[in-house]
Image (cartoon, rainbow, N blue to C red):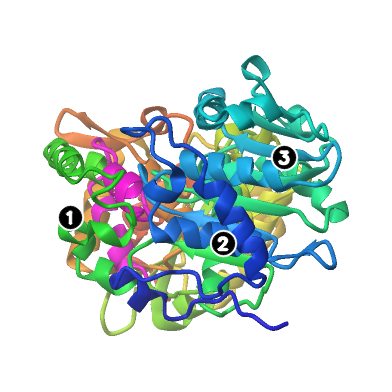
Amino acid sequence: MEWDTSCVDWEKRIENSESLIPVGPLFPDQANDALDVFSNLRMVDATGSPLMGDACLPWVMDIVATLFGSYDESTGRRLIKNYFLMVSKKNGKSTIAAGIMLTALVLNTRPSGEFIILSPTKEASDNAYKPIRDMIRAEPELAARFHEQEHIRTITDRLNNATLKVVAADSTTVTGKKAIGVFIDELHEFGKKSKAAGMLTEATGGLASRPEGFVFYCTTQSNEPPAGVFRAKLKYARDVRDGKVKDKMFLPIIYEFPQWMIDRNMHRDLRNAYVTNPNWGVSVDQEVIEQKYQEAASEGEEATLDFLAKHLNVEIGMNLRSDRWAGADYWESRGQSLTLNELLDRSEVVTLGVDGGGLDDLLGAAAIGREKDTGRWLHWGKAWAHPSVLERRKEIAPRLLDFEKDGDLVIVEDIGDDVRELAEIFKMIYDTGKLPEKFAIGLDQIGISFEEPFAEAELPTELLASISQGYRLGGTIKTVERKLAEGSFIHGNRPMMAWAVSNARVEQRANSILITKQASGTAKIDPLMALLDAAQLMALNPVATGLSVYESRGIRFI
């Protein structure tokens, strides 16, 4: 039997409110049995407590039919085992989870089988459990068959002792489970948890011995840049949908705006809200959403982006907080593909910057090149970290591991490997002849010492310049933000740098501005500070060969 789970024409389908499921039920009889059960469940919290079959729109029924219709009764095997649904808030995700998992429990024939709904928090698990409880209590036949234990959020089938359990995210809760069906609720929240990958592996590991099993990932878009397991799963789902990856066992259903609509700012027009809200006008109240949007717009861009992520599934590239650095507003628009080698080839002179390096810090490195002919500043960045950062800063650990996969961050095992690797890169750049003879490498004057590893790499000490931080860096901060605004600063469009830039918090101090680690809290800005150190030197208008006019003036501390 052949089928294809890609949906390469999804943009046309979603614009025209057509089904995003490219494959129908592989086994119609199985699908019909499931639809019969699902349709007769009662949606108690809706006005009039209608049956699911009367209240749910076709897009929901298509999901149910395809999921249960992928089960081959003759072999006892489910042919499509993984489902990924991303849809905006208030489109009935909790009700869909309840209906699908209760239907699975009703149809289950495996004695003592286990089904799990895994939620990111206790509150979310309570919300997932209540619709199931209400569906059972609303029908005498279901109430007689199932033993409902609200205090442990567990439903037990009296006929075969199979269970459906709703659990909050905790690795000890799911260890050793052999679940037939797993529903992962609000996957974007798992992306923020440092141990989420292991937790989901434990929760879904039982499918290896349950050929009839399935995993259903359900989520809205995150109100932060996607990270961790959510980022990885979303990328994979998009690749399957777009036909870049062939996976017949994975079905992506993603309600998001096509890029061309976002490029034209059409996602900010609520007349297009139906694109990511298939329940627009049903469970999604148009007037309420319009009021929320107006309220968010009045509060500023930070609140607006939060609204767009939650209610319109718009992916956030950067966290633009109210106290953000002004340059962050232009950062994304100034990115292009740019490797270090390309920067060196295109530049007439290069300056370097370093910042951080503590055990709970990143060691950030930056290169800024002045482009031949145009004079534009080109930027490249990289960072290193010791594994201790992952433990000391668990809240950002998933994001750091993402940057490691991207190749922008190196997790070193031994202290000292980071500065040695950095020194080797700087030596390679020095050997190109693109560095000024003096004051080419800007260092935080109260940071860790680099003199020994730089000496080992045969980098002349004359290259080093100690950069004063705090308010003395204010002029450089303003220079870089102006260059970003006018388009004369170009960077490599790397997620790690976007993250560091969005972490920066600005303080006004007398007639200057500061970007400090204290103001930015636990979030890391070391790669950005390294950029500013390099920018401080580039602002001196250096030349790659011969003596700079500043050398004769003896400038050493800048």
Amino acid identity at mark 2: Ala
x%, y% of residue 170?
A: 69, 29
Question: What separation in Å lies between label 3 and label 1 (alpha carbons)?
Answer: 38 Å
Residue at 64 percent across and 59 percent down: it is 68
Task: From the image, tell me which residue sits under label 3.
Answer: 115
Report the disc number at residue 270. 1
Kind of element beneath mark 2: helix
Q: Position of 346 compared to 354: left or right?
A: left
Inspect the image, locate mark 1, and give the three-letter code of the amino acid beneath it.
Leu
Q: Quadrant of residue 422?
A: bottom right
Q: Residue 355, labelled with which disc? A: none
Residue 346: image x %, image y %? Answer: 41, 82
Sooner in the amino-acid sequence: mark 3 or mark 1: 3
Foreground residue among 139 and 393: 139
25 sits to left or right of 544: right
Q: Residue visible at 47% across and 83% down?
A: 345
**Mark 2 = which residue?**
65
